[in-house]
Amino acid sequence: MLGCDIIETERIKAAYEKMGEKFLKRVLTDREREIFDRRNGSLQFLAGRWAAKESISKSFKTGIGKLAFKDIEILNDEKGAPEVYIRSERREDIEVSISHDRNYSIAVSLLKG
């Protein structure tokens, strides 16, 4: 199944400014938060993770709800390619691609099989 999501970076910025730490704790896992911090709080990183998690939840045909944002974790392999974990389990059957421009982040995911 295929999933796709696009998010305007300004929407993520507004939510982050309004909710602060609470927003980060809702969206990012501890390991993703470490990456966010290393990237000096990059809003593009945050928007990309948001879009990727929405995309993955859509590929499962559930949307966010049955799978929470923190149930889905996107880390990077040694070459920088995203790797998907669901509830801490590496999922080889899910591919995701994340892209950014100045104003938007988009993600496409494929659940194989």
Image: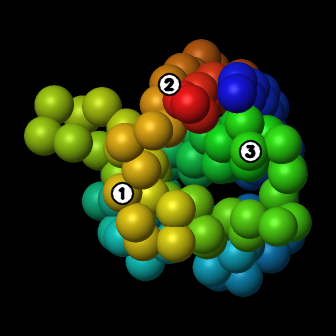
Q: Quadrant of the N terminus?
A: top right
In x, y percent, where is residue 64? 82, 58
Pair 3/2: label in front: 3
Disc 1: CA contacts within 10 A as few (<14), some (14-19) or many (>=20): some
Is residue 8 placed above or below 73 in the rendered structure? above
Q: CA distance from mark 2 to mark 1?
A: 16 Å
Q: Secondary structure at mark 1?
A: strand
Q: Earlier in the sequence, mark 3 or mark 1?
A: 3
Q: CA distance from mark 3 to mark 2?
A: 16 Å
- Residue at image mark 1: 90
Q: Residue type at mark 2: give it.
A: Ser
Q: Residue type at mark 3: give it.
A: Phe
Residue 97 tag number: 2
- Seen at 74% across and 44% down, the residue is 60
Q: CA distance from mark 3 to mark 1?
A: 16 Å
Quadrant of the image occupied by residue 113: top right
Is residue 53 placed above or below 64 in the rendered structure? above
Q: Earlier in the sequence, mark 2 or mark 1?
A: 1
Disc 2: CA contacts within 10 A as few (<14), some (14-19) or many (>=20): some
In x, y percent, where is residue 41? 48, 57
Residue contact between numbered discs 2 and 1, judged by CB atoms under 8 Å:
no
Quadrant of the image occupied by residue 92: top left
Quadrant of the image occupied by residue 5: top right
- Residue at image mark 3: 60
Pair 2/1: label in front: 1
Residue 109 visible, this orientation: yes
